[in-house]
Amino acid sequence: MNGKKSSETHLSRREFLGLSALGLGISLAGARSASAAPPAASPDDVAILYDPVKCVGCRACQMACKRWNKLPNESTDPLGIYESPRDLSAITWNIIKLRRTAVGWHFFNYQCQHCTDAACVEVCPTGALSHDPMGFVALDREKCNGCGYCTQFCPYGVPHLQIADILTGAAKSAKCTFCQDRLRSGIGGPSCAEACPVGALTWGKRGDLLEKARARVAELQAQGMNARIYGENEAGGLHRLSILLDEPEQYGLPSVPKTPAFARAWQRIIQPLGNVAFGAALAGILGVFLFVRRKIRMEEVR
């Protein structure tokens, strides 16, 4: 009798351990997948190049972005006259600001940098933010759960939450999408670049734009300007390249943009560990169920 009971218990443990191992294996496979390295910037990726020396501050890019993406104005004065927004927001994805640098005051354009090593993509738990095969950081608002992680970890402060329901607090992330609908449908390129009347914003293949930027930097340096390219290597390579005439900090840009360690840990360690814990718990429940079911059957046989 005792021997029979011992054999029965031993078999149940094997079933439990087998199920646990299966759940753990599936979870670890997810962890390995999550630890994949970020994609490398390709010369064939699409990108935008901004030359502030050419910019006249007309804000055609800003208005084109609003118009194409059907974004409302930030505010109007009592007379109904349009007021330019002060910063990027959930309804302003492209903006011109006046900056003071070593060469004096000049205009500068801000929008999503479309990083190759994008912190927002790293922390997004639903896949709403992702690397498009063309290179830019795409946004699928249908997948967004409004967690706000992207708004906290982006080194450029680009994504913002747009409140969808004031009562429930439901929100969706919002940012420049590189006019992904235009590119994917073949209509054209980013509306901001196509609207620029002076060629301060241009778009095309990243490799071609880098060559153009290097030539332009050499030209400006020959004129005595401290010009440089921003975005060639920052954050794994940006898909929004800029020519700077001073240190990045003078433009409010980080000289060394970094994806916080916690952001990487979130997707690559913490979430996979959560999957492991869930898998182990599920295996435990199934193990107990099988153990109890076997006990009942053995009791019926007796």
Image: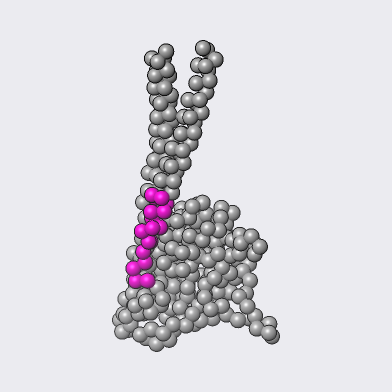
Q: Is residue 126 magenta?
A: no
Q: Residue at x 52, y 12 (%)?
A: 301
User: In which quadrant is the N terminus drawn?
Assistant: top left
In this orientation, does residue 200 appear?
yes
Quadrant of residue 119 in the image?
A: bottom left
From the viewer's perspective, is 163 left or right of 260?
A: right
In this orientation, does residue 61 appear?
no
Q: Is residue 71 above or below residue 5?
A: below
Count of numbered badges drawn on the protein: 0
Give the percent coordinates (x, y) of residue 283: 46, 34
Give the percent coordinates (x, y) of residue 195: 55, 72
Quadrant of residue 18 in the image?
A: top left
**What is the magenta range?**
254-270
Give the percent coordinates (x, y) of residue 36: 37, 48
Q: Residue at x 41, y 45 (%)?
A: 273
Q: Is residue 83 above or below residue 3?
A: below
Colouring used for the render? one colour
From the viewer's perspective, is 181 left or right of 112?
A: right
